Amino acid sequence: MPYRGRNAFVAECKIWNGPQKLTDAIDQLLKYLTWRDTKGALILFIRDSAATNVIASAGKVLREHSAFRLE
C-alpha cells in the first residue's frame, strides 16, 4: 500500500517448494521493488519437519542469487 507516494513495505509470502521456487520468489519480489523502496521481505513458510535443512538450503540459494550483495 502506498504511503506518501511510495511503497512503505513490499513483502512476498511463499511456501518452501525447493531451491528453484525460492529463486523464482526472489526474482518476483525484486520485480516489485523500485530504487525508491526502502524495505522488502520474502517470508518463507516451511512445512517440512527438517526446517534446519531447509534454512541451510535457502541460505545457499540467497548467497548464490545474482542480486546478492554483502555490504
Image (spheres, rainbow, N blue to C red):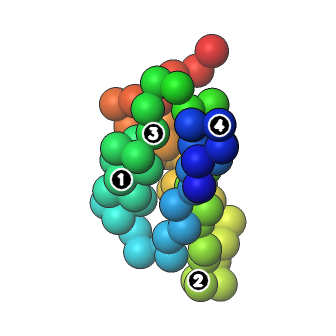
Residue 45 in the image: above or below residue 71: below
Q: Position of residue 69 (x, y in %)?
A: 51, 22
Label 4 or label 2, whichever comes before in sequence order: 4
Q: Nearer the viewer, mark 4 or mark 2?
A: 4
Label 4 or label 3, whichever comes before in sequence order: 4
Crowd band around label 1 with a 10 angstrom C-alpha radius: few (<14), some (14–19), many (20+): few
Q: Nearer the viewer, mark 1 or mark 2?
A: 1
Distance from Cα at disc 4 to Cα at disc 3 = 16 Å
Q: Position of residue 55 (x, y in %)?
A: 62, 59
Residue 35 in the image: above or below residue 41: above
Q: Is residue 40 visible?
A: no
* Three-letter code for the amino acid on which mark 4 is drawn: Arg
Q: Position of residue 41 (x, y in %)?
A: 61, 50
Which quadrant would the N terminus be assigned to in this image? bottom right
* Three-letter code for the amino acid on which mark 2 is drawn: Asp
Q: SS class of the residue under badge 3? A: loop
**Residue at the (65%, 43%) spot, across then down:** 3
- Please give the residue where the numbered disc 3 appears in the rendered image: 33
**Residue 28 — which label?**
1
Contact between marks 4 and 3 (CB within 8 A): the answer is no
Q: How many marks?
A: 4
Name the outermost residue toward the front. 4
**Residue 48 — which label?**
2
Label 3 or label 1, whichever comes before in sequence order: 1
Q: Nearer the viewer, mark 1 or mark 4?
A: 4
* Three-letter code for the amino acid on which mark 3 is drawn: Leu
Q: SS class of the residue under badge 1? A: helix
Crowd band around label 3 with a 10 angstrom C-alpha radius: few (<14), some (14–19), many (20+): some
Q: Nearer the viewer, mark 3 or mark 1?
A: 3
Distance from Cα at disc 3 to Cα at disc 2 = 29 Å
